[in-house]
Image (spheres, rainbow, N blue to C red):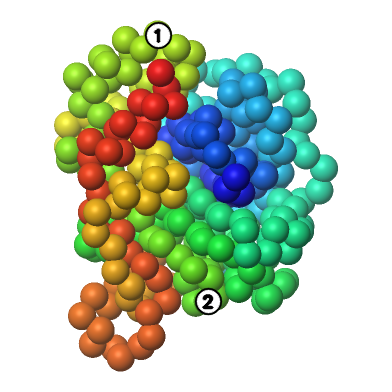
């Protein structure tokens, strides 16, 4: 049994990623910590708890940091809708938040499951950075951290240079990338193009006729439209589920390599840029693996597996 912990600013694509982990054979999600990012932290927590209940799971959801370490919050309603879930306005979950702060819960889980716990981060890295600053021993106790964040090819989705999760809290990202934790960075570019769910893919998902399939398409209705109109992609991009698929089935990532990765925190022009030293010109030791490409068919089959 693999032991996962998910850190998330739960909006529509995060919710699908959470669903994937909760329904994947051989994986136990020990906890979910929520963070400000796509939406305010309380809304992210509501969306996460609703998703857990949809999956008939009992995974605890902890309320985390309400803002970036040093900056004002920035939200992505324009992409995910006014509720972060495509305007579906799902009901309030029955189960409350788990007791305690997310940073404390995450710290406790890492120590209790030292060497076993795998982290999957789907939002800004504020919770992790806060935990690492309070307890510097934590990074070495984590088995693996798969990060949905960054843009290894320097093609941003919130600025020309930066991906949203890293841009929201670049200082936190810098702390995490320099922490010594085993990292696999899955940049947002991996969900583009052929990895999108095009019209035929979405029709296939709808044909499954399950509550999980309908949920996946319904809560991402705004994201589908925005992705096509704003970014010019052919369908629905699901960066968080792609990252979760890589964490669940490492063979989804078809090319990976280790490099020194730094995060820009000073320049407003390139704020949040993940600078990947692919050629090793800085002569710095690698601090992260980078996923450069995925198998689109294998990623989609991982998704379909949990939606059928």
Residue 263 position, x and y percent, is 40, 72
Q: Is residue 66 left or right of residue 239?
A: right
Task: Identify the secondary structure beneath mark 1.
Answer: loop
Q: Report which residue position mark 1 lands on.
A: 209
Residue 36 badge: none
Image height of 195 relative to 265, above or below: above
Tell me whether the residue at label 1 lies in contact with that at label 2, contact meaning CB atoms closer than 8 angstroms: no
Work out which quarter of the rendered image holds the N terminus and state it. Answer: top right
Q: Quadrant of residue 298?
A: top left
Residue 10 position, x and y percent, is 53, 38
Q: Quadrant of residue 167?
A: bottom left
Q: Is residue 277 left or right of residue 182?
A: left
At a point 56% along the width and 33% down the height, the residue shown is 22
Q: Report which residue position mark 2 lands on.
A: 180
> How many angstroms separate mark 1 from mark 2 (CA)?
44 Å
Viewer can see residue 40: no
Residue 132 position, x and y percent, is 65, 70
Task: Identify the secondary structure beneath mark 2.
Answer: loop
Image height of 39 relative to 139, above or below: above
At a point 75% along the width and 36% down the height, the residue shown is 97
> Residue lying farthest bottom?
283
Q: Nearer the viewer, residue 219 or 287?
A: 287
Residue 198 position, x and y percent, is 20, 26
At a point 64% along the width and 22% down the height, the residue shown is 56
At a point 35% along the width and 26% down the height, the residue shown is 304
Image height of 177 relative to 87, above or below: below
Say whether disc 1 or disc 2 marks the residue closer to the N-terminus: 2
Work out which quarter of the rendered image holds the C terminus and state it. Answer: top left
Neighbours of disc 2 within 10 Å: few (<14), some (14-19), many (20+):
some
């Amino acid at each position: 049994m693999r032991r996962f912990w998910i850190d998330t600013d739960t909006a529509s694509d995060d919710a699908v990623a959470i669903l994937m982990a909760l329904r994947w054979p051989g994986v136990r999600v020990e906890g979910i910590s929520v963070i400000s990012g796509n939406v305010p932290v309380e809304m992210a927590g509501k969306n996460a708890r609703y998703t857990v209940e949809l999956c008939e799971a009992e995974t605890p959801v902890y309320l985390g940091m309400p803002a970036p370490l040093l900056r004002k919050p920035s939200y992505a309603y324009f992409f995910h809708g006014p509720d972060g879930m495509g305007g579906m306005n799902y009901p309030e979950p029955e189960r409350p938040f788990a007791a305690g702060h997310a940073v404390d819960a995450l710290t406790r889980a890492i120590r209790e499951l030292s060497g076993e716990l795998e982290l999957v981060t789907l939002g800004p890295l504020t919770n992790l950075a806060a935990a690492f600053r309070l307890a510097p021993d934590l990074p070495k106790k984590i088995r693996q951290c798969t990060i949905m964040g960054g843009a290894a090819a320097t093609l941003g989705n919130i600025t020309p240079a930066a991906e949203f999760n890293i841009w929201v809290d670049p200082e936190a990202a810098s702390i995490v990338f320099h922490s010594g934790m085993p990292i696999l960075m899955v940049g947002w570019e991996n969900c583009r193009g052929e990895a999108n769910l095009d019209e035929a893919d979405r029709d296939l998902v709808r044909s499954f006729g399950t509550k999980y399939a309908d949920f996946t398409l319904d809560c991402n209705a705004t994201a589908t439209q925005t992705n096509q109109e704003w970014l010019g992609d052919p369908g629905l991009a699901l960066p968080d589920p792609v990252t979760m698929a890589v964490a669940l089935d490492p063979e989804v990532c078809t090319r990976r390599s280790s490099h020194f990765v730094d995060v820009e925190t000073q320049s407003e022009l390139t704020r949040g840029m993940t600078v990947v030293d692919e050629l090793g010109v800085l002569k710095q030791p690698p601090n992260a693996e980078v996923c450069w490409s995925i198998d689109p068919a294998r990623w989609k089959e991982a998704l379909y597996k949990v939606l059928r």
